[in-house]
Amino acid sequence: MHGREFAWEDADFDRVQSMIYRRAGISLHDGKHAMVYSRLSRRLRETGYQSFRDYLSWLESTDGSEWQEFVNALTTNLTSFFREQHHFDIFADYLKSKPAATPWRVWCSAASTGEEPYSIVMTLLEALGPDAKFSLMASDIDSKVLSSAKQGVYRLDGLKGIDSGRMQRFFLKGKGGNEGMAMVKPELRKHVEFLNVNLIRDDWPFKEPFDAVFCRNVMIYFDAPTQRKVLERIHKVMKPGALLFVGHAENFSDSRDLFVLKGKTVYERR
């Protein structure tokens, strides 16, 4: 189109739609033209390609590391600490409903930059105490956000949802050159295992079933058949009676054979 750095045609967008759907299950609707152009233009500059057609042809001819960059560029990572607070209240009550020594296995399937998994760990420690027995797997398809999540460093103005008690218990405030930043304390980070997992692939690394799964604001990027496929897989890695927490815009009433609604966007595994 006129005035753009790279030629961008409908055929290029159609190819991107097809490629990201096959690779990550993401359904890009037709209103995403500008977003896709903007994000993938960076990849053309990085790789030295002069046209989308050549870049996409090269990508399709390889199975190298650029595929991860392609996926990273097209995924959206909106998150915050204790987003949708009611989920954490329900999760805390669920944790307290079982004997104190119960070991817990939890999966956060869209870890993004770490705000959600660290919120989960804080809830686990607050509900069960410092001697809590649990493991938390935190996964994402985007390798760059996972790297950021492992660091556990955030701007203070992004921690407005954290009260002073939690700030003191779970974070270290930066000084000097790190003024205005805060880092999650090592005793919180040690509880999280970060993994790169593609939800539409069948190579999930989990050996034991989970007591709770957070899969929030992920399914909105999938079409109905992909949603069903992913839900069936999630069902297989959950214990009967385990809780599934989903996003506020997600509704799985068509999968009543797998999950029963237990509260506001919270499902129980059948």
Image (cartoon, rainbow, N blue to C red):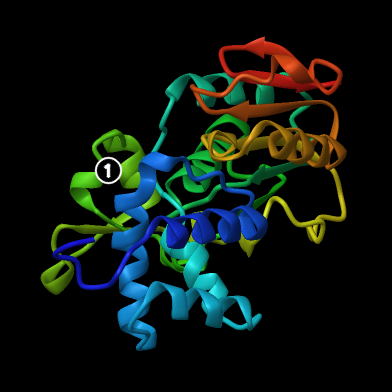
Q: Quadrant of the N terminus?
A: bottom left
State the count of labels. 1
Q: Is residue 168 shown left or right of residue 149?
A: left
Whether residue 68 is visible here, answered yes or no, is: yes
**Residue 212 percent across, percent down from the top left:** 71, 34
Q: Is residue 261 above or below residue 33?
A: above
Instruction: State the residue at coordinates (70%, 20%).
Output: 267
Whether residue 192 is visible here, answered yes or no, is: no
Q: Is residue 29 shown left or right of residue 107?
A: left
Q: Quadrant of the C terminus?
A: top right
Give the residue pinned by disc 1: 159
Q: Quadrant of residue 241?
A: top right
Instruction: State the residue at coordinates (47%, 52%).
Output: 112
**Residue 196 percent across, percent down from the top left:** 62, 64
At label 1, the amino acid type is: Leu
Q: Is residue 4 above or below residue 48?
A: above
Q: Quadrant of residue 59?
A: bottom right
Q: Is residue 120 shown left or right of residue 148?
A: right
Q: Which residue is most to the bottom?
A: 48
Q: Is residue 114 shown left or right of residue 27?
A: left
Circle 1: is it few (<14), some (14-19), or many (20+) Cα within 10 Å?
some
Instruction: State the residue at coordinates (62%, 46%).
Output: 109
Where disc 1 sits, the SS reads: loop
